[in-house]
Image (spheres, helix red, strand yellow):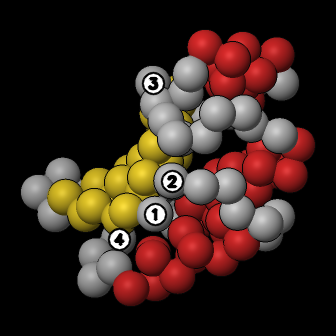
Amino acid sequence: MQVTIHNDSLTMKIVFSTVFESGALLEIVHEQLQKCDFRPIELILDISNISMLHSPLLGDIVSIYTHVQRRNTELIVTGANPFNQTVLKHTQLDKLFSVA
């Protein structure tokens, strides 16, 4: 996992390089947001290294969305391969948060 913080735009970007156990993803994001010395207006999750979104991971992304919404932070999911884009579309999660 790589965390990049852009202070100029108040954006936090998290690049995932592996699939985590269910629930671990939310803990990692929460921990990174707590370490941040500013309140980001955007949280970008780069899932380009995730070959297939499965149900537990989708649940984690929805939990992250709920968590960041309480902080008035926008969730943007980037790097989805064609298969994962289809999954996000069929589950209508692309209507819940931004998919770029």
Tag 1 residue? 1
C-alpha separation, residue under disc 1 versus residue under disc 3: 19 Å
Q: Are marks 2 and 1 in contact (CB under 8 Å)?
A: yes
Q: Amino acid at mark 4?
A: Arg
Q: Secondary structure at mark 3?
A: loop
Q: Quadrant of the C terminus?
A: top left
Ranked by sequence position, the earlier of labels 1 and 3 is 1
Nearer to us in this view, 12 or 4 = 4
Tag 2 residue? 17
Q: Nearer the viewer, mark 1 or mark 4?
A: 1
Q: Nearer the viewer, mark 1 or mark 3?
A: 1
Q: Secondary structure at mark 1?
A: loop
C-alpha separation, residue under disc 2 versus residue under disc 1: 5 Å
Q: Amino acid at mark 1?
A: Met
Tag 4 residue? 39
Q: Nearer the viewer, mark 4 or mark 3?
A: 3
Q: Amino acid at mark 2?
A: Ser
